[in-house]
Image (cartoon, rainbow, N blue to C red):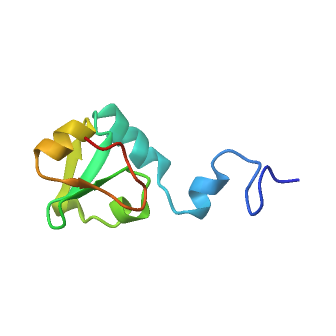
């Protein structure tokens, strides 16, 4: 029996189903990037957000805190709703 409707019992199955590259998320975390922003939309997200995963490498901006993102003129994603400044 699954833990929730449409859910999975195995760790990692949900991230795989949502096409989340957990190795990439781990790399970002080790590099200190808690949030990813797009320099074209000026929106920042959690790295696991579908919108963050679509940001092309040349347009990714890494932020350690929501405050850093806000001070740089970025707004929080309305989908994943990261902490706001």
| Residue 82 position (above or below residue 56) | above
| Residue 30 position (above or below residue 12) | above
Name which residue lies at 28% across and 50% down.
36
- Give the left or right position of residue 3, taking residue 53 as reference: right
**Where, quadrant-wise, is the C terminus in this rendering?**
top left
Point out residue 48 in the picture as x, y percentages from the top left corner. 44, 53
Point out residue 59 in the picture as x, y percentages from the top left corner. 17, 61
Point out residue 75 in the picture as x, y percentages from the top left corner. 23, 55
**Residue lying furthest left:** 72
Name which residue lies at 39% across and 48% down.
24
Name which residue lies at 89% across and 53% down.
1
Name which residue lies at 41% across and 45% down.
25
The number of callouts visible is: 0
Q: Nearer the viewer, residue 81 or 55?
A: 81
Q: Nearer the viewer, residue 36 or 21?
A: 36
| Residue 18 position (above or below residue 25) | below
């Amino acid at each position: 029996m699954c833990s929730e409707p449409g859910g999975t019992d195995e760790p990692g199955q949900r991230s795989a189903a949502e096409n989340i590259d957990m190795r990439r998320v781990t790399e970002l975390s080790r590099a200190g990037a808690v949030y990813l922003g797009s320099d074209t939309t000026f929106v920042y997200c959690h790295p696991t957000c579908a919108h963050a995963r679509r940001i092309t490498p040349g347009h990714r901006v890494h932020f350690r805190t929501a405050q850093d993102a806000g001070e740089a003129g970025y707004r929080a994603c309305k989908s994943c709703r990261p902490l706001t400044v």
